[in-house]
Image (cartoon, coloured by chain):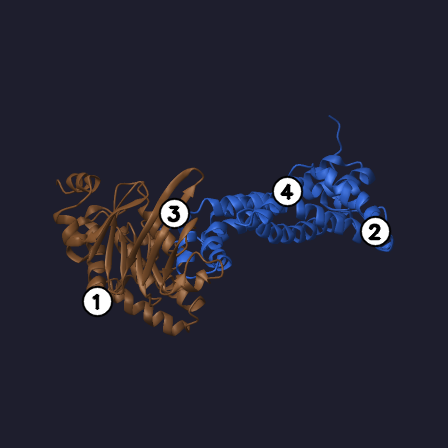
Chain colours: A blue, B brown
Amino acid sequence: MGYQWNWGVFLQPSAAGDDTYLGWMFAGLKMTIALSLSAWVIALLLGAIVGVLRTAPNKVLAGLATAYVELFRNIPLLVQLFIWYFVLPELLPKALGDAFKQSNPVFQMFSASMICLGLFTSARVAEQVRAGINSLPKGQKNAGLALGFTLPQTYRFVMLPMAFRLIVPPLTSEFLNIFKNSAVCSTIGLLELAAQGRQLVDYTAQPYESFIAVTVAYVVINVIVMTLMKKLEDKVRVPGYMGGK
Amino acid sequence: MIKIENVSKNYGSFDVLKDCSTTVNKGEVVVVCGPSGSGKSTLIKCVNGLEPFQSGQIIVNGTSVGDPKTNLSKLRSHVGMVFQHFELFPHMSITENLAIAQIKVLKRSKDEAMDKGLKLLDRVGLKAHAHKFPGQLSGGQQQRVAIARALAMDPICMLFDEPTSALDPEMINEVLDVMTELAQEGMTMMCVTHEMGFAKRVAHRVIFMDHGRIVEDDSKDAFFANPRSERAQQFLAKILQH
């Protein structure tokens, strides 16, 4: 088809002259990893809290948690990102909004992306945490309470350790998703992996090499995540329970 | 020790418990029996506040269970409970199951809790299994561990909610033996069970429930020799036939 393959393109100095094109790809990779991992921390923490609250006996707290989940999982990720990046700074108190808009542009894009991805994913994590808790036999909670544990202690020592073990497989999917979803953040100009790939196409006119490299990078990240999560799953497996020895 | 006065409970328009009153004195073993759905499990769960009730009151060792000001966790920490499905914590080893509430609730040191746990494990004949996990034990063994776990809290009384109903027939006796021993040592016990042999052997009193009411509350001998209500007669006739 007359396409001129040129894998050597990655070693050429970039148009800006400060780096090679391979350097651009690695910069994008680093950004994707930093963004996804920081968003994942937010997602896990908030997701655990909201998921627990959804199962709480207090109706007000459970209702608020439900509202949170429905809000963040029913609006497209892209729309949420635009709201965080373009709309929210306008809604903040003027001084704060201005300070944000005058800050380092990369910081602006990164923080909006991190919060957006973190909260979006936390709603999904919360649903899994809730499902994990609800799948435990009801007697477990009673057994914890009957021993004199308070309700928070019962969650902490009895229910959550088992609930989290049960949801390692679906959490793995969410962890993989957060890396893939981070590509959406290229739309506000954040130079993560996908954006660097597109930039490379613009500068070098070598789209196949660029996107193959981007694809391989995402696959490598996710194979590593899957491997680590599988290790975690094996490590926390309960003897004599659900496939444990 | 346990005083149940005019307790009623309903889910919407369905009455689960109707005006139930009885007492369990210190050192007494009371067996609660009755057909399924008669409210016996609900009644025993009301005693340590696992189930709320709408009216009446339950006093355990001088503390009112239904009073919103009562520290239920504290009360429960010295009322032992054993469940139909054992409810050991699957992610903890047997010793951890025995020790955790002693450490977190009674604030005992880890060594003290382990020591106590192992002694009780020995008492229920399972010392060799200390480092296993619940999923690696048989049902009967798990239930004996569950009894040891409750005893580790130095309970003032023990509640048993159908402790042998989920067991294979050949494992029932090992659990009943532990319970019998406990009863003979003078433990105050309230047992929901269908094991009439156990009731005949160790109970002081038998309570018979039907449709949320306490139909019969009598000494063991009187209950087995001559149940007053027709429903209890039918029940006994059915389950004692074999």
The extreme top residue here reads: A1
Q: Which one is in front in this view, the residue at disc 1 or the one at disc 3? A: 3
* Residue behind mark 4: A67
Q: Is residue A189 visible?
A: no
Q: Distance between the residues labelled 1 and 3?
A: 33 Å
Disc on res. B185? 1
Closer to the N terminus: mark 1 or mark 3?
Answer: 3
Same chain, labels 2 and 3: no
Disc on res. B236? none
* Residue type, numbered disc 2: Pro
Q: Is residue A61 left or right of residue B235?
A: right
Q: Which chain carries label 3?
A: B
* Residue type, numbered disc 3: Ser
**Label 4: how many residues lie within 10 Å, few (<14), some (14-19) or many (20+)?**
few
* Residue behind mark 2: A105
**Taking A216 as reference, is B103 above or below it?**
below
Q: Which chain carries label 2?
A: A
Q: Position of residue A135 (x, y in %)?
A: 45, 44
Q: Mark 4 lies on which chain?
A: A
**Label 1: how many residues lie within 10 Å, few (<14), some (14-19) or many (20+)?**
few
Q: In this view, does A167 lie to the left or right of B220?
A: right
Image-quadrant location for residue B182 = bottom left
Image-quadrant location for residue B189 = bottom left
Q: Is residue A36 visible?
A: yes
Q: What element carries label 3?
A: strand
Cβ atoms at labels 1 and 2 below 8 Å apart: no
* Residue behind mark 3: B8
Q: Position of residue B81 (x, y in %)?
A: 34, 57
